[in-house]
Image (tube, rainbow, N blue to C red):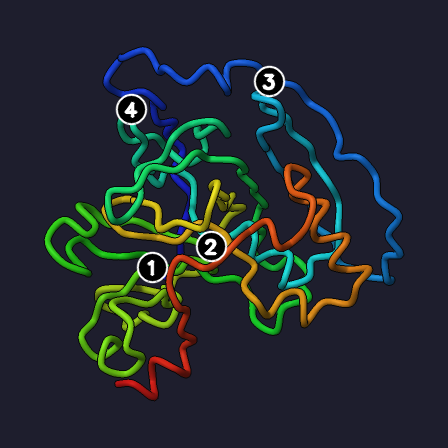
Amino acid sequence: MSFSPPSTHLNPNPSGRRLSEPAWTARRTTQPAPRPVTMPQARVTRRFQTEWLADDDVQSAVQSAPAFPAFEKAFGAFTHGVLIQTTDGPVAVEDLLPGMHLECAGGHVSRLMWKGSITLVPGAPSLSDEPDKLYRVMPDAFGLGRPLQDQTFGPHARRLDRDAKIRAAIGSEAALVPLSAMSDGFSVVEVNPVSATQVYHLVCETHQNILAAGLEVESFHPGPETPISLPEEMLQLFMRFFPHMTSIRDFGRLAAPRLSADDLLAIA
């Protein structure tokens, strides 16, 4: 199945009410402060777009960096048009601004601190083993109204799964599972983008499960494996995407345990 990104632009404030968050009313374009980084040679690069909250102002940057999978995971959970629930109503992900407050699982509210995006181009060179896929979730795939209508997510989306088998296997009420691992050709369908598709990810004040199109989808967190798998110079380059942070420890703790596709197979 192929996927073409929607061309319609969604109103970020469909209710017509005035948004009350002053933190994101000012907007500046700047570059993150340079850090001494030794970048290894890489022939494949991407343009990474970021917006973040600094001193109650929204700042933005565009950086060119190697297209390492560890980098791309920080930018690839939501496609254009996915509605994110905010305290002022649903807002399309592309219209979110750092400083807005997002409604999250468990009745929590968290301020959006960072938004990143990249463009997936079919057939473009990549350092990944497999070409990027998107995942279309059909209506009511995970319960009534989850989602209300078919919705496409990026290659690195994870959703909060409360399946009883997970609780029995790991002793936790819920776990974060890759949406890609749920692909069955019926309720979750793997699709190939047929044109350039912009994908996004979000970082909140703490790691959260955001309400996105009726699903509980995690905000970005690098996980414990990233600082272990990346050499020091590449970890420094990675952190340049997040100038509002001083250390990878600033991401804090995971909101829930994570399971891989192999873990899910073992549980089933």
Give the foreground label among 3 and 2. 3
Nearer the N terminus, badge 4 or badge 2? Answer: 4
For this rendering, which residue is in front, 57 or 177?
57
| Residue hosting label 1 | 159
| Residue hosting label 4 | 88
Nearer the N terminus, badge 3 or badge 2? Answer: 3
Instruction: Pinpoint residue 120: horizontal percent, then vertical percent.
Output: 56, 51
Amino acid on which the number 4 mark rests in the picture: Asp
Quick one: SS at disc 3? strand
Amino acid on which the number 1 mark rests in the picture: Arg
Nearer the N terminus, badge 4 or badge 3? Answer: 3
Residue at 33 percent across and 37 percent down: it is 109
Amino acid on which the number 3 mark rests in the picture: Arg
Quick one: SS at disc 2? strand
Report crowding for label 2: few under 14, some 14 to 19, many 20 or more residues within 10 A (C-alpha): many
Report crowding for label 4: few under 14, some 14 to 19, many 20 or more residues within 10 A (C-alpha): many
For this rendering, which residue is in front, 176 or 148?
176
Mark identifier at residue 27 = 3
Nearer the N terminus, badge 1 or badge 4? Answer: 4
Instruction: Pinpoint residue 181: horizontal percent, then vertical percent.
Output: 37, 72
Report crowding for label 1: few under 14, some 14 to 19, many 20 or more residues within 10 A (C-alpha): many
Give the foreground label among 4 and 2. 4
Confirm or deny contact between disc 4 and disc 3 (CB under 8 A): no
For this rendering, which residue is in front, 78 or 85?
85
Q: Is residue 261 left or right of residue 52?
A: left
